[in-house]
Each structure stands twice: as structure tokens, then as C-alpha cells.
Image (cartoon, rainbow, N blue to C red):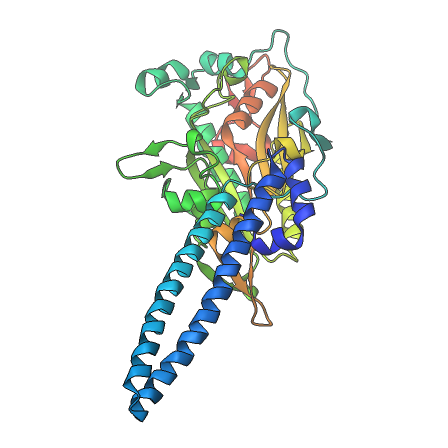
């Protein structure tokens, strides 16, 4: 969440940033935070003054008793009791103000960087780079859901029978392709210096609040109500929460972790042709990369993460593009975000396969993830993460873009992992 220092010292810039994200009544919300902080500060000042007065009276009481002036001592004791009651009232005021500030800050999104373009939706995102080569396909090329049926790779109907729509069953070479991609992505992350983590796929509410999924995306998460636990929408949540309530040494940074997990998203309200096949699922596999860094180095870390994700798409021989998201299309928690999309030749559309974000201190402030600098001062870290990569739409593009008259050709980089060159 935003810090009070950030809000108080840069009020107009914070409001302008929230308006870029199209956060409603931004100035009203920020002014309410400032007013609550002023109330808290005023109560703190009064409390300190009363505490000083009570301390002075306490010393006088001892002196009165020593001098045998019992009447004055009893009067001073009564004054002390009144002061204690007033101090307790002020402490309650401060606690209420602090709770109200936190509750309000949890509903206010992160402020985007200046580099983030203006805009309200996906149509306003800025394409910053394209790469790869579009491949000629056979006449009457098939979409991946038909290819999956033709080669018995993925059974969507069986998934409906077992669980429901959005939970496919991978079979034979389809299952081996999934496993190959997971291992390929993890191996590439290891080569880039990421330490592999195998975290839980169920988290408590504190973890959801720490990374900003709660309360923003509560309706999109699967909730185990009896135990008050949540199925993770991404490995970002458990991996970043490793560093909740932790003070790191600057020499440890940047920390680079990666994790393969299943991910679960309700995708409430999704419908239409864009959700066919693997385009939008409730359960899917993903390899995530997460970094914890200093403010001074986080931009370099972000650039390295972008280069890593791009290298994966190059090795998979897929046509891709990189977009810098506009304010209106960014997530609640991101300060800046780049999306990677691969082109589906058969569907004639771009498919998002990765988002790589820098959250600045927003998540770290929620998590109390801090580091001790060389000067011994304790500061908030920057947190970053990205998909490297999410599997469903990668599989969709691989199947569609590599179909030939003979069958589906597997890119050379994947063949050591699949153990086969063709699906035919």
C-alpha cells in the first residue's frame, strides 16, 4: 500500500497517478487519509503533553507524602487518575484513526510511474517491441482445441465431467508437452540465477493482503471458507510472502526466486469466444519469477526480467510482442507492467502469456518487507514478479503455429524435454 510519507509529501503527484489509473474520487480518498493522519497526530501530541503532566504530578505526589502534606498528595492522585482516563481516551482515538487509515489505504491502488501511458483499456497499451517470425500454415489450419482433439492431447469434456468447465485433462503427448515446458522454464530460470522454490498452493488471508490480491481480487479467488484459506492465483503470492515481516541485509539483494505451481482463478464473468479451449482456464500451470530488490536497482532487475521472458519466446520460436500497459489496464498493485503476447496464427489474435511488473514499495509496505542498508538505516524493499511462463496460451500457440500437413512440429529447444520431435 502507499506510505503516509509518500501521500503527505507528494499529495498532488499521488492524486494525479491515481487518476491515471482511473481510481474514482482519488483526491477525496487521499484527503481523507491525510485528515485521519492529522487526527492521529493531534491525539498523539495531546497524549504526550498529558503524559508529561502526569509524570510531573507523580513526582510531586512523592514529595507531598514525604513532607506530610497528605491532602495535596490525594488531590494530585485524583488529577493523575483523570489524566490516565484522558490518555486512555486519546489512545483509543489514535488506534481508531490508525485502523481507519489502514482500511482506507488497502482500497487505494499503487501509483503508476511516469513512463506508464495514459489510457482506459487494452486498446491504449503501447507496443514497445515485436519479435519472432509468423509461420505459413496449411490451408484450413485448425485452432488448438480441434488439434487437441485430433491428436488426443487434451480432453476438455472429460475435465467438465470430473470438475467443470475450465479444468482440462492433458493426455499422452499433451501431458508430456506440459511437463516439458515446466522443466524447460525452470531450467532456464536456474541458468539465469533464480533459486527454485516449491511453495504451498493454498495461502492464508494475511498472504493475500500482503501481495494485494485481497481485498482487490477477493471475488476472483477460490476460498476454502471453513479454514479461511485461498487457492493461489499465482506463485507470486506464497513466494513473495516468504519475506513478510523480514528485515534483509542489503548485501543479500537482489533476491531471485522462481517457482512452478498450479494456479487457480475463478475468472468470474468471462464468456464468449475468447475463453474457448486453453484461452482462459480456472486451473493452469505456471512458472513464476520473483525478485526482492533495493529501490536503486529495481529498474535494472525489471529490465533483466523482461529480457529473460523474451529469451524464452525466442527459444520457443513464437511470434511475440511486448506491450507497456496503460494506467487503465494495469493491475491494482503494479507501478509499471509489461505484457508479453504471442500470436496465434490459427485464431488470428494475440494471446497474453506473461505480465512482468515492478510494484515499487507498494507490496513491501503491506508485507513489512525491509532491508538494512550499509548505513544501518532500515528501508522498504522493491518487489517484482513475472510469468516465465504461463503454459495454457503458450501451448495453444505452439500447437497452432507449428501445425503442418504431417502433424505438429516441436521447436528444437523443447525436443530434449519432450523426447519427440513430432506430434502426429
Q: Is residue 139 above or below residue 348?
A: above
Q: Is residue 192 visible?
A: no
Closest to the observer: 67 or 220?
A: 67
Q: Position of residue 116 (x, y in %)?
A: 70, 39
User: Quick one: which residue is furthest to the bottom in this view?
Assistant: 67
Closest to the observer: 262 or 324?
A: 324
User: Quick one: which residue is furthest to the left in this view?
Assistant: 226
Closest to the observer: 326 or 90?
A: 90
Q: Quadrant of residue 75?
A: bottom left
Q: Quadrant of residue 246?
A: bottom left
Q: Is residue 217 visible?
A: yes
Q: Position of residue 254 (x, y in %)?
A: 57, 57
Q: Is residue 187 above or below residue 22?
A: below
Q: Residue at x 43, y 33 (%)?
A: 218
Drawn side of residue 273 relative to residue 307, left or right = left
Q: Position of residue 63 (x, y in %)?
A: 35, 89
Q: Residue at x 63, y 11 (%)?
A: 138
User: Quick one: which residue is furthest to the front in this view?
Assistant: 71
Q: Residue at x 43, y 50 (%)?
A: 99
Q: Position of residue 223 (x, y in %)?
A: 35, 33
Drawn side of residue 118 relative to residue 93, left or right = right
Amino acid at each position: 500500500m502507499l506510505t503516509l510519507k509518500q501521500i503527505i509529501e507528494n499529495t498532488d503527484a499521488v492524486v494525479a497517478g491515481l487518476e491515471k489509473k482511473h481510481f474514482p474520487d482519488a483526491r477525496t480518498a487521499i484527503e481523507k487519509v491525510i485528515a485521519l493522519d492529522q487526527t492521529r497526530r493531534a491525539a498523539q501530541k495531546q497524549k504526550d503533553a498529558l503524559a508529561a503532566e502526569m509524570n510531573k504530578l507523580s513526582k510531586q505526589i512523592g514529595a507531598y507524602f514525604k513532607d506530610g502534606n497528605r491532602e495535596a498528595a490525594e488531590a494530585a492522585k485524583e488529577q493523575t487518575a483523570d489524566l490516565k482516563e484522558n490518555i486512555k481516551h486519546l489512545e483509543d482515538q489514535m488506534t481508531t484513526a490508525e485502523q481507519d487509515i489502514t482500511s482506507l489505504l488497502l482500497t487505494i491502488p499503487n501509483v503508476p510511474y511516469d513512463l506508464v501511458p495514459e489510457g482506459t483499456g487494452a486498446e491504449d497499451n503501447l507496443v514497445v517491441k515485436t519479435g519472432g517470425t509468423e509461420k505459413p500454415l496449411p490451408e484450413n489450419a485448425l485452432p488448438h482445441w480441434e488439434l487437441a482433439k485430433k491428436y488426443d492431447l487434451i480432453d476438455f469434456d472429460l475435465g467438465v465431467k470430473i470438475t467443470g468447465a475450465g479444468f482440462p485433462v492433458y493426455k499422452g503427448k499433451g501431458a508430456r508437452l506440459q511437463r516439458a515446458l515446466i522443466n524447460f522454464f525452470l531450467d532456464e530460470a536456474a541458468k539465469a540465477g533464480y533459486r527454485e522454490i516449491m511453495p504451498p498452493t493454498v495461502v492464508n488471508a494475511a498472504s493475500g493482503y500482503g501481495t494485494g490480491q485481497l481485498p482487490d481480487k477477493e471475488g476472483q479467488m477460490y476460498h476454502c471458507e471453513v479454514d479461511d484459506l485461498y487457492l493461489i492465483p499465482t506463485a507470486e503470492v506464497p513466494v513473495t510472502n516468504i519475506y513478510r515481516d523480514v528485515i534483509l541485509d542489503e548485501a543479500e539483494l537482489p533476491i531471485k526466486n522462481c517457482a512452478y505451481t498450479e494456479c487457480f482463478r475463478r475468472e468470474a464473468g468471462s464468456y464468449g469466444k475468447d475463453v474457448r479451449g486453453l484461452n482462459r482456464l480456472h486451473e493452469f500451470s505456471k512458472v513464476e519469477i520473483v525478485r526482492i530488490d533495493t529501490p536503486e536497482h529495481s529498474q535494472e532487475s525489471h529490465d533483466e526480467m523482461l529480457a529473460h521472458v523474451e529469451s524464452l519466446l525466442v527459444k520457443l520460436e513464437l511470434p511475440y510482442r511486448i506491450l507497456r500497459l496503460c494506467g487503465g489496464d494495469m493491475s491494482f498493485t503494479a507501478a509499471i507492467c509489461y505484457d508479453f503476447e504471442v500470436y496465434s496464427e490459427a485464431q488470428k489474435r494475440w494471446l497474453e502469456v506473461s505480465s512482468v511488473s515492478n510494484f515499487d514499495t507498494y507490496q513491501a509496505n503491506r508485507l513489512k518487507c525491509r532491508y538494512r542498508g550499509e548505513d544501518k538505516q532500515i528501508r522498504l524493499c522493491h518487489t517484482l514478479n513475472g510469468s516465465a511462463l504461463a503454459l495454457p496460451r503458450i501451448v495453444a500457440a505452439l500447437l497452432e503455429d507449428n501445425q503442418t500437413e504431417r502433424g505438429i512440429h516441436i521447436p528444437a529447444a523443447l525436443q530434449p524435454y519432450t523426447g519427440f520431435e513430432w506430434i502426429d
